[in-house]
Image (tube, rainbow, N blue to C red):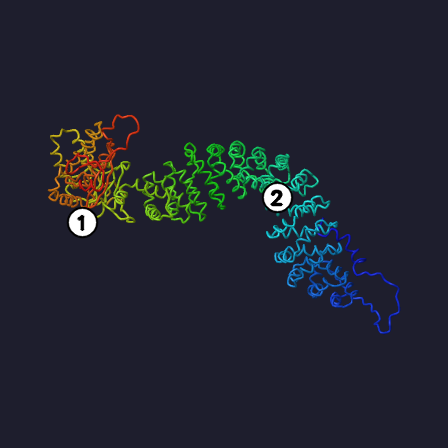
Amino acid sequence: MGKNQFLSENQMMYSNSIMGKKVKKEAEPPPKDVFDPLTIESKKAATVVLMLNSPEEEILAKACEAIYRFALKGEENKATLLELGAVEPLTKLLTHEDKIVRRNATMIFGILASNNDVKKLLRELDVMNSVIAQLAPEEEVVIHEFASLCLANMSAEYTSKVQILEHGGLEPLVRLLASPDPDVKKNSVECIYNLTQDFQCRAALQELNAIPPILDLLKSEYPVIQLLALKTLGIITNDKEARTTLRDNQGVDHLIKILETKELNDLHIEALAVIANCLEDMDTLVLIQQTGGLKKLLSFAENSTIPDIQKNAAKAITKAAYDPENRKLFHEQEVEKCLVALLGSENDETKIAASQAISAMCENTGSKEFFNNQGIPQLILLLKSDSEEVREAASLALANLTTCHPANAKAVAEADGVDPLVNILSSRRDGAVANAATVLANVAMQEPLRAGLQSHGVSSALLGPLRSANTVVQSKAALTVAATACDVEARTELRNSGGLEPLVELLRSKHDEVRRHASWAVMVCANDELTAVELCKLGALAILEEVNLSVSRKNKFSEAAYNKLLNNNLSLKYSLTGYLSSSNIISDGFYDYGRINPGTKLLPLKDLCLQEPSDQRAILLVNSKSSDVSPPPSTEDKSSDVGYGRSISSSSSFRRASKEKTKKGRGKKEEEKVKEEEEVSTLPKLMGEGSPEKEWYPPFDPDFRVYVYEVTKSIFPITDIKEQIEVLARYVAEKMGGKMSKEKLHNFSWELHVSELKFQLKSNVVPIGQIKKGIFYHRALLFKALADKIGIGCSLVRGEYGRAWNEVQLMNESRKGLIGALPPPEVYIVDLMFHPGGLMKLRSREADLYRYL
């Protein structure tokens, strides 16, 4: 039924019989002092408009009748009347004493108010109170009809809504819902529908108890009235109190009956929208379930062929499923089967709504398990859809399904879901990218599945998301890196594809979750030494150091990532912190630069080797590994002045010397020692200036290599850990100048010895094995380096004024062999200077260190 269906039947009757028509009496001769009646026939609207200012009621009534007929003919005529100035005099007639004039003026405004310009003028003239007054119970039905029609047209504008509410228009409109006239009902409910867009109106409707009369309109024989009633209910039932009132007035039964009636299929979509709101209310959902309405609803949604109905049914489930009790009820009614069926719809909006409903139902464990076999394959198919909205909704469902559910993550991988997920990482929709990254992260959490991800180029595909401006995408991408980079191959691919640079930049993020996930990813990537070095080059360490200085920005992952980077760059860690734990194993290539301040960049070993010697502290190098890339030595090589990185000599002679030394008896050790000292100047300087194409290697330390061999052969077999420590301590002291006394320490000319080595090597970098006169920090480093080679756990601690020492942990001898919980091991300082091999129990660190140092 159209907006004015009933007008077509009554308009002519109004104009021919009601409007302005009075019963004629038999004419009497007029008095002599009265003007004779003048009959005028006008064909100009302007003339009739002028008649609106007449004081005669009959003229006014006839003028209104003519204007009404003129306005009915179309929008152009309404605009003409506006131009001719008809609106203002007509507003005065709304309060005219003559009932017929007042009625005819009201009818005109019912028609004119559909014109936007007229509506604007009416608001300016403030006629709302006059129009609302026409809704009084004592007024005729025809006045009710056209006054409510005027308000229905006016209420489409926000300002008019406010005016209607302020002038008390809502109460008479609610009352007119019970009018016997269908046009009055239709206009009143339409106006109320427009007013309900404002929350103040919805609250006022609740106070006026408007829901029962609106529910009665569902029984109307006119579909347009039913439709408007459903639309109105669809808005006001967003409020909990309205849903309770609807339930108490058996409104749910009315809605279910509408769905069951095929003849009312044009009302099904709006009825479902109201039910969707009602399902949010637990009590209403239980009522629907107990009366069998929920099964009917799900069956109806699944079997319907109308896409909008399926879509709205899925949306109804989505809204209700945010409540845990509702999800439980839905699961008991096997709502999952309905949703899986809706995924197969040909309509994209239905697919989206079904995917969103699955996302909501994922909070229920039983639902998650159901979708493992049914649902995940269909969702993966939707990932390949041409619609980006469909792909985003499907990826969201998969993200929720796989979170904290390894079986579903496995199902995604087994259903060939990785490829389409990787493709979505390049989507233009941030939501889809974030969802896909989440699913891939969930899959990568399982080691057997993680290995297969690399063949799909996941690490390279994450480059775009890591550079996204969206913080959610950044966070999920970083989390995926953290999950996938557990394998060397993944870290290598990420490093080679340039993924480390944007990852490091995310450490600067002001967003807590982005910074936390980026720190997590950096921590995982730092398991690889090459990757850790690259991260440090990109400034990760400096950024993390700055972050960790802030109480509000730091997090457990930023601290762990910082420590992990340092643990893979022990040279830097020792320079920054002055401490290496027993788990920090010194390997070949380690160097002790000395203490540096936070934020100071530590130059790579190669750059330090290329520097000319200076008066700075010697840089101690640990390296027992030789290179086979150099050519055999020549006489010229041995006689020439060499420096690290500035000329090339072979390390083969030193390898031969090392082998011979290990084979011959101790009787020839002194002779070989002399030879080695003569050959100090010919230590290998791999990759000279003349051959830049050669790969650079750290200078080889043959003496240290001999040390490693000797301690491995003689100390490693010792079974008692304490004895091992004592023997190794004496060995280190012997190699570094022997036992010292505190009184004669100032006469120990170690500085001259080290300076001579720097001059001979033409470098500040001195291999630890070449130092034959060493004090605290030389001996402590050598002890730690050798202890790590043979598996003795010890720490290396840097003190002030060139001091350093080693700490070891030993069980109390008196507690050995006892059953039960053992006390923690005791910490000892290893004496390498004054009583080599002595162990000093560390009770008070400051006091004991003072006694030792």
122 horizontally vs 649: left or right: right
**Residue positioned 13% across, 32% down in the render:** 669
The answer to whether 648 is drawn above or below residue 822 in the figure is below
Q: Which residue is mark 2?
A: 243
The answer to whether 316 appears left or right of 725 in the picture is: right
Point out which mark residue 34 bears.
none
Q: Residues within 10 Å of mark 2 (few under 14, many from 20)?
A: many
Q: Is residue 31 above or below residue 232?
A: below
In the image, farthest residue toward the front: 207
Q: Which residue is mark 1?
A: 615
Q: Amino acid at mark 2?
A: Arg
Quarter holding the C terminus? Answer: top left
> Which mark is first along the chain, 2 or 1?
2
Amino acid carrying label 1: it is: Asp
Distance of label 1 from label 2 (alpha carbons): 86 Å
Which type of secondary structure does the marked residue at label 2 adopt?
helix
The crowding category of the residue bearing disc 1, from other C-alpha atoms within 10 Å (few below 14, some 14 to 19, many at least 20), is: few
Report which quarter residue 826 is drawn in: top left
Determine whether the residue tagged by mark 1 lies in a helix, strand or loop.
Answer: loop
Q: In front: mark 1 or mark 2?
A: 2
Front residue of 827/377: it is 827
Percent coordinates x, y for residue 757 in the rendering: 16, 43
Judged left or right of residue 448, residue 250 is right
The answer to whether the residue labelled 1 contacts the one labelled 2, judged by CB atoms less than 8 Å apart, is: no
